[in-house]
Image (cartoon, grey):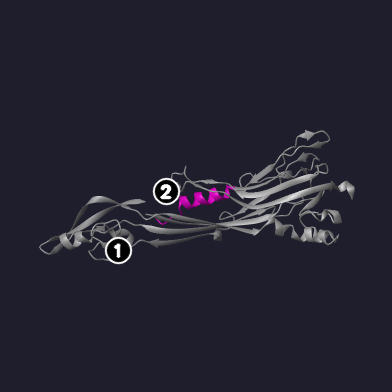
Amino acid sequence: MAYFFTGMWYNIRITLTPVDGKYQRTFKQQNSGDIQIKINSPMEIEYMQAREAARQGINRKDLYDKAVFPTDIDLQRFDYPIKSGYYFNPAGKYSFKVETVTYKPVPYDTQEHKDIVNAVINSFNYETDLMYINDYREAVNIKGELLPERGSTFSTRPGRLTARDNIGINGIELVTVLDRNSDESRYTKKVEEIYHEHISGGNTHEYWKMVMEGYEESNTLSSRDNYKYREYVKPGQKMYKITETTEVDIIINKDNINTFTHAHMPDGEYYIRVWMDNIDLGSSSHAYSSLGTLSGVMLDEMYITVKGSMYDD
């Protein structure tokens, strides 16, 4: 929303004469935004090669690229069985595209677009309660936090990684964000001037006419017909429609670094979840604060069944 000053034409002896307008008008075109989310490579795909190799009883190491699944026949009834002590690398690729349309009196990159993109990035979460072992042979979660001891084993402590808190076990960058900062081509901008002329009947965009008197678009055509009164935008005032698009990829463990589970992780079911939190736009000072809170979404989920340990092999 932006304010601008008008002039007006009125009739004196059949001659149209320009004078300063009485009112400050408000440009009312609505800003808009669109967020598209895509799961480029879900965990099911990331672990498929290794899982199929185990299902077929194939023991070639190169096939177990991201995780070691057991070939034991009695464990094939589980979707994703593992034995503790082997590596199970975090994996997954997700992306989203943010497009905003903003109306501004200057054609620059907008803070509104930047803030929405950052809000979406910062809503990303990767969490698991699997137990790992670090380089110091300590029991930790995926974030590298120590696990509480429970007798001869340990208690679970879910570890959560985000775009801002992306460093996990052994100092590994486990959440990588590829956006405009890493590649400028991920951001595009299209600028269209909302044109106007300051002569009666001149070439003026309908968006201006919708908020000025004397036009069909504002339902005030009678002012022109009955009183020869019509407003126009004074010279020197600009308005632009700015369409910005940013494409973002989020990659889990982009270098596929091995992360080993703890050999004393108890048997049972463990989870991995990837989701986007609710996005609070209501507290923003920008016009899109009227959108309130955007609901979060579950992107990916997997359950891992631990049965036995590497010491059984």
Residue bearing the label numbered 1: 204
Between 205 and 18, the residue placed more toward the observer is 205
Q: Toward which corner of the image does residue 140 lie, by quadrant?
A: top right
Q: Magenta stretch: residue 113 in it?
A: yes
Q: Disc 2 designates what residue?
A: 287
Q: Is residue 173 in view from this perspective?
A: no
Q: Which of the 4 image quadrants contains residue 16?
A: bottom left
Q: Amino acid at mark 1?
A: Thr
Residue found at x 23% / y 56%: 7
Specify whether residue 176 is painted magenta: no
Describe the element under mark 1 as helix, strand or loop.
Answer: loop
Residue 238 location, x and y as percent? 34, 57
Amino acid type, residue under disc 2 in the picture: Ala
Q: Closer to the observer: label 1 or label 2?
A: 2
The region drawn magenta spans 106-123
Along the horizontal axis of the image, is 12 left or right of 200?
left
Q: Could you tell whether 202 is left or right of 270 in the image?
A: left
